[in-house]
Amino acid sequence: MAEAHPVGFQWVMEAKKRGAKVFHVDPRFTRTSALADTYLPIRAGTDIALLGGVVRYILENELDFREYVLAYTNAASIVSERFVDTEDLDGLFSGYQPETASYDQTSWQYEGQERNGGEDTAKERDSAAGLRHESHGMPVPGQPPQDETLQHPRCVYQILKRHFSRYTPEMVERVCGVPKEKFLELARAWTENSGRERTGALVYSVGWTQHSVGVQYIRTGAIIQTLLGNIGRPGGGILALRGHASIQGSTDIPTLFNLLPGYLPMPHHADHVTFDDWVDSISQPGKKGFWGNSRAFAASLLKAYWGDAATPENDFCYGYMPRMTGDHGTYQQVLNMIDGKIKGYFLLGQNPAVGSAHGRAQRLGMANLDWLVVRDLFMIESATFWKNGPEVETGEIVPQECRTEVFFLPAASHVEKEGTFTQTQRLLQWREKALDPPGDARSELWFFYHLGRRLREKLAGSTHPRDRALLDLAWDYPTHGPLVEPSAEAVLREINGYDTVTNRPLAGFTEARDDGSTAIGCWIYSGVYADDVNQAARRRSRHEQDWVAAEWGWAWPANRRTLYNRASADPQGRPWSERKKYVWWDPEAGEWTGYDVPDFEKTKPPTYRPPDGASGPEAIAGDDPFIMQSDGKAWLYVPSGVLDGPMPTHYEPAESPLRNPMYGQQANPTRKVYPHPVNRINPSPPEAHSGVFPYVFTVSRLTEHHTAGGMSRNVRPLAELQPEMFVEVSPELAAEVGLSHLGWAHMVSGRAVIEAKVLVTDRLTPLRVDGRIIHQLWLPYHFGSEGLVTGDSANDLFGITLDPNVLIQESKVGTCDVRPGRRPTGPALLDMVADYQRRAGLTVEHRTPLATTDAAGERGEDA
Amino acid sequence: MGLRTFIQGWPVYRQLTGTDPLGRGAAAQSARSAELTARTETADSMARSVCPYCAVGCGQKVYVSDGRVTQIEGDPDSPISRGRLCPKGSASKSLVTSPLRQTTVRYRRPYATEWEDLDLDTALDMIADRVLAAREETWEDVDDEGRPLNRTLGISSLGGATLDNEENYLIKKLFTAMGALQIENQARI
Ligand code: SF4
């Protein structure tokens, strides 16, 4: 955090000054470790084992915040008797289907609700359905049986206890390489600093998501924080440090294939044929919780898209919507580019040649397009792959034979346009424009508005049904100035939503209607333009308001700064303690009040109990704080919605030098794999030849560079501060391989070989894992062939294997070999990779086995 | 200048006797620096902005004189950053004023070995034509069972995490109406 989010780290230091204990877990000792109370080196890819150890520590010693757990979580819910745990199936859960490498979740359901789990989870994997749960959980029908004593062998509490029983301190040490004493120090401090009087925070950087079990990493953290009562309370929470100025915004208003604004799903051709199919799949009529209103959100979105053409009679032009049939994610696209299936590609401030996994696949894909549009501030590697890329050096891309037509369009910088970024805590901040962009540089707003205008002009008069969606689009934004720049405020106003009759901006999403009387571009952002005021532009100084600073920018939803803050009060609505007071029930006024906007219906009393047969928000009781969950509870156990298991389980990374010490099942049995000649995955036990790639490598950021380097390698002071690609190795590894400090090394994987200067440092330490010494290497991933400072790209080493829930690649851990000296160049480089592939058995036909235990044959639920 | 004035003018003297014992303020000021004014004071305008790098969202003040960015510094009013910027945020002025920034459209013909110039308006028109052609060639109306697809898988897009919400909104809206499903950004990576 001190390295990649330095200014955010000031708050950790503030907390430390006030007595907080800071623990830092990382494969490498960094500036964060230097300032922490305790540093725990860890083997990359084993975080579930470590955190699972903490879960076990809490449960075995009954250190959970029992009142919170009983009232606010599903700990007491009883699970189906057909459920079989990883304890009994060698690392698999019941319902595993080897043919599709996915789970039938029927047996994971609560007792009496077994019919709820029948979704085709292979299909959900392809559409990254897990991402929809960024704002809410899956629906569950009605209240399952409960055991408030938590003694029933099939209640969630007991199931969790049994599931994590083997995550002992000894096992943590054996799997993660974290000494037992250090682990216990962490577990003790975490539990001692949680409860009524104290809270603890878990902070992760989004490298956590870049694992084949990334979602389950975060789930394990969520289980701990829920058991300890650290959610929805001040000083608690799980804080994701995201890496781009508006990456949260680009998830909320998604430039993603499977989502529409506000986490509405992109329609699927088979499941969402009609508007009603689509809407009912979101709102689940008859079920509990706030998603009951989603018909109004969906209708209002289509109304914002198609304006006057969208009417209740024509289902708001739902018929225009494109449909998914499977996986249309960025990695599938790249492989399709290599296979010649894609004609054109837009790159908008993104540099996949350096920033995405498997750089060579990225570049080969771009070299096989009809056309490519690159919009950026600088001439990045993704614009010049045909000229300066590593494949030109090896002869794989020959400029005279490469047909891709490339348009480079200069972009406006952040000071040359106005608009909002959404930072990592869901806070929207409006930026004022300082000056016009230079020369041909333009904002994306300009580019897409005028591209759309031109497409519509060219199609005018068309009688093709497919052109109606473009011709009927509501696309008349006001423009201003000599550049004819569209008004960003007008777009933000549409995102907020307005009354289609009076044109009044809506005050919030509770005003959404499903009759065409409201249009809302992104329902969770509704309120950002309340009272016809740009709320994101608010800049009341921190000196002039309290510590919650509710008048600085605007946070979704409804300007709430801490989600689920109803949980900061006890079931009766009183603060858990004076020290940790945040939001509470005021019986005199008959409403919720506090420092933040209460995340609860303002006048619903703590004593409210839903009438029989209630659905939607009405069905949420006055002491159910988790209002976006269909039962109002935090889920320790997830009966559906997480595709690789109802509870997290330690699996080895897709590429590992070790056999999984915990189960016969080696790696995530449901991970998304792409068998393709370009995508050779290094062998791991129990496969043969894993010794060809004996070392573990991980990558991350330098303080002075930014992701793929476009915005830092072209900037003098930053380039000067970190001028060269390098690899960090421990003195022990340097001695073993014969590397010398400031000399060269090259790293080889089944995809690529790259070189780097060697930094021998005890920031990396060999770990004793399962009786062996494991060496880890660390590389920054910012370098490429363009800019003021250049170097080989670390991401070239990775193959493509994805988390099944969100289709994010495993690019924080892989295996490689390392050798002293510089890499070969030209065709000799390809020979070297081919030689490694041959020795490792990575033929074109090679397939990594997904299930590695005999239990895969058993169906589990019959066992 | 008398001896007394000379001694009293000495920074160390001022530091020991004045109100600035650490010598980080008035005591360290020379006659020359006392006469200087900060760029921020004489700027023609100041825009309140946000750092474009990571998602912490540090506040920035962007000063402009004579149509040029002359200074970018942390916004002390921000409850997030309290006026601080890290090395990247502090380099924002160098980012936006970098001589390496491309300011004209560049075009590479198929099979060419070099870039050429191209007029922005022509480029936009050519891109619009290519979008329509790709759409035409790869359009899918319905699936095998006659259910609607309304899409093209011939067009891809990647990017958004460095852009504004308003920009992402227009991108998603336009691509959806074009039937172009395959849009992605850093959040998938
Ligand atoms: S100044 Fe540094 S910490 Fe702050 S937003 Fe920019 S990059 Fe992030």
Image: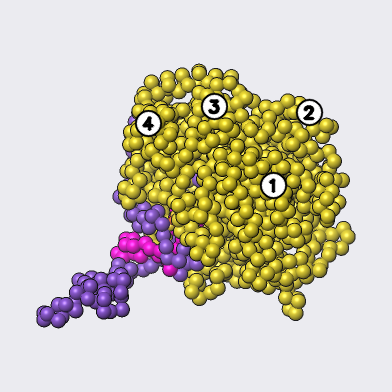
Chain colours: A yellow, B purple
> Disc 2 designates what residue?
A858
Q: Position of residue B143 (x, y in %)?
A: 70, 34
Q: Is residue A298 left or right of residue A758?
A: right
Magenta segment range? Answer: B51-76
Q: Residue furthest left?
A: B2
Q: Is residue A28 left or right of residue B114?
A: right
Subunit ID for the residue under disc 1: A
> Disc 4 designates what residue?
A739
The kind of residue on which mark 3 rests is: Asn
Q: Earlier in the sequence, mark 2 or mark 4?
A: 4
Q: Earlier in the sequence, mark 1 or mark 3?
A: 1
> Disc 3 designates what residue?
A682
> Which residue occupies 46% across, 19% down?
A835
Q: Secondary structure at mark 4?
A: loop
The kind of residue on which mark 1 rests is: Arg
**Cα distance, mark 4 to mark 3?**
23 Å
Look at the numbered discs 3 and 2 and tell me whether their residues touch, using CB distance below 8 Å: no
Picture quadrant of residue A63: bottom right
**Cα distance, mark 1 to mark 3?**
33 Å
For residue A372, above or below residue A847: below
> Disc 1 designates what residue?
A56
**Cα distance, mark 1 to mark 4?**
41 Å
Whether residue A741 appears in magenta in the rendering, the answer is no
Subunit ID for the residue under disc 2: A
Q: Earlier in the sequence, mark 1 or mark 2?
A: 1
For residue B115, above or below residue A494: above
**Cα distance, mark 1 to mark 2?**
28 Å
Q: Position of residue A110 (x, y in %)?
A: 82, 46
Q: Secondary structure at mark 2?
A: loop
